[in-house]
Amino acid sequence: MARGESEQFTHFCATHPQLANCIQELRCYMFSLTAQRSLTDLIALTSILPSLTNLQTLYISGSQHREPWTFANARRPPVKLKKLVLHRCTGISSVLPILLTAFDVHCLELIDLQEPKPVSLVNLHSIYYGQTFELSQLIINGKAPSAVRYGLLQRGLNPGTLTAFAVGCGTTDDLLELCSLLSSALAPSLQNVSVVVDASSMWDLQGQTFTGLGSALAKCRALEYLSVGIKDNCGADAFRPTFFSSILAPIGAQRSPPPLRAIGIRMWTRMPAKYLAFDDRLSPVRSLDFDSLDELLSAPAGKLSRLESVTLEIVAYDWGWGTQPVVTLHKAVLRRIREAGLLRFVYNPKADWYSENAEIFVPHSSRRAAQSERRGT
């Protein structure tokens, strides 16, 4: 549904109720070129949604807002959604509190949000009017103002409700703000955390930044599933030889570490697949700390002894060369984990390598079981 079409769509839903009931995903692009019209379209949209009884996912892209949306505009009771995606929306902090009370959302995904002017945390308090909301899953990808990323969510999200969190970090400030969130009242309920670091855009990284992230993750006492990823252009950065161990070592060093059951190790590379043989001297695996990671995760009777699986996923840029080669993992890589029967290896060529990357972590074996269940096998 593009801008200005809310009236036509409302008429369609009213005159074709059986078809409307079949809609499971609704995508709305560029509500309007003006903020006032965009607000009108958004209000009209919320009046339509209750008639879409099977709607699961609502995707809103390009919506613009300048002034807060009053609570009088929010529908009661809230519309249930499995997932709400806000993509490249402007001024979303002024309407996000209302959206999250107008909708009963299981998963919220924020992608490349922008603010027309700086948002102060003092103003955020006045926007909420004491209202709170609940989320089970939160995904943040691309650019998003820190006030929206963490300040807005920490002030409105009920503690104890967020169980899964995925985030892409493109700056050092992103990492520091993530550590702050993982140390907040939202952290104790987190069972699933996925972090992707875009190292190619960070020029001021220091080793203690990743150690601080590991220490913050260690405070998530309910954490069972953890995925850590690094995305770069194969540069020989000084931090890369200690990236994974710097994050995971503080977790294993705890007297009572989180009860981790599955760990995901993800690496993005733009190198052609012919260099991904892992025994090749040009392989990116040679500049990462897989040996120390192997020793850390396979220590006998270690603090991470509850581990059931470790998934290594290589996300390679799909150069469009036709048939993808078979990429296998060299026997010397993560040998101890492999011999313990914990290792799962996934090669994932992607044409949209530059797109959003953080996603809720699903261990490879669990993902396969879920796919089989959907196929009825």
Image (tube, rainbow, N blue to C red):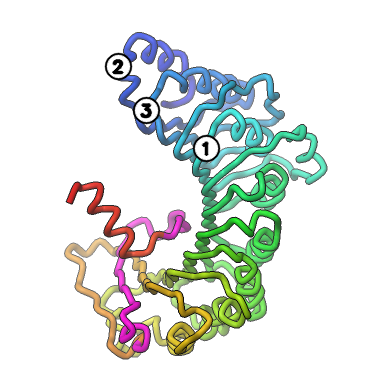
- In 3D space, how far apart are the residues under numbered discs 2 and 3 (Cα atoms)? 11 Å
Q: Which residue is mark 1?
A: 105
Mark 3 or mark 1: name the one nearer the start of the chain: 3
- In 3D space, how far apart are the residues under numbered discs 3 and 1 (Cα atoms)? 14 Å
Asked whether residue 288 appears in the rendered view, the answer is no
Q: Nearer the viewer, residue 21 or 261?
A: 261
Cβ atoms at labels 3 and 1 below 8 Å apart: no
To which quarter of the image does residue 89 belong? Answer: top right
Mark 2 or mark 3: name the one nearer the start of the chain: 2
Query: Quick check: 144 left or right of 155?
Result: left
Other residues around mark 1 within 10 Å, as few (<14) / some (14–19) / many (≥20): many
Q: Nearer the viewer, residue 111 or 364?
A: 364
Tag on residue 61? Answer: none
Asked whether residue 225 appears in the rendered view, the answer is yes
Locate the N terminus by quadrant: top left
In the image, which residues are magenta?
335-361
Residue type, mark 1 in image: Val
Residue type, mark 2 in image: Gln
Mark 1 or mark 2: name the one nearer the start of the chain: 2
Other residues around mark 2 within 10 Å, as few (<14) / some (14–19) / many (≥20): few
Q: With respect to residue 136, does 271 lie above or below? A: below
Q: Nearer the viewer, residue 245 or 146?
A: 245
The x and y percentages for residue 62 are: 52, 35
Q: Which residue is mark 2?
A: 18
Q: Which residue is mark 3?
A: 54
The image shows a total of numbered marks equal to 3
